[in-house]
Amino acid sequence: WLHLWLSRVWYLAPLIRPCGLSRQKCGSICCCEEEKYYFTIGYHELEGKKVSLKKPMLVLQKVLREDPIDVESSPVVLSTQYPTQVQKTSELKAIGIIRHKILFKTRPKALISK
């Protein structure tokens, strides 16, 4: 899982969806040395390190279900116009745990200079 915080917006890959940026490449992250990560966006490079989170974050996915309602056993009086009624429910499914983050403290370094 990849978790990015850019300009007050959460990005979570592979489910990147804010502001119509679905599945667009933002940059590249590589681990060249132990515990050192480099994040390249355009002509700028950030250097960061891997840090453990104090509290792990749980990644949840909302699952929508439609269950048919049994008209005879239902305590609610239902209309006879719609004999096949469904009850819509939603559940949250845990699909991942984020235990580490990559912390970029330094200012971006320009890769191209005049």
Image (cartoon, grey):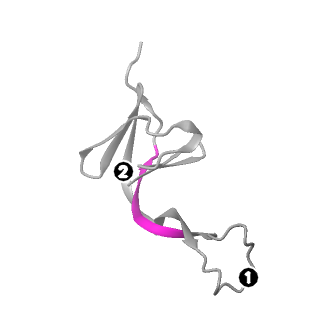
Q: Is residue 13 left or right of residue 88?
A: left
Q: Is residue 82 visible?
A: yes
Identify residue for label 2: 49
Q: Position of residue 41 (x, y in %)?
A: 42, 32
Amino acid type, callout 1 = Val
The magenta-colored residue range is 91-105
Q: In the image, is residue 112 part of the stretch drawn in magenta?
A: no
Q: Residues within 10 Å of mark 1 (few under 14, many from 20)?
A: few
Q: Residue, x 29% and y 52% (percent of image)?
A: 35
Q: Quadrant of the N terminus?
A: bottom left
Q: Position of residue 69 (x, y in %)?
A: 61, 76
Q: Nearer the viewer, residue 96 or 107?
A: 96
Identify residue for label 1: 76
| Image height of 37 relative to 64, above or below | above
Q: Residue, x 24% and y 51% (percent of image)?
A: 34
Q: In 3D space, how far apart are the residues under numbered discs 1 and 2 (Cα atoms)?
A: 58 Å
Nearer the observer: mark 1 or 2; the answer is 1
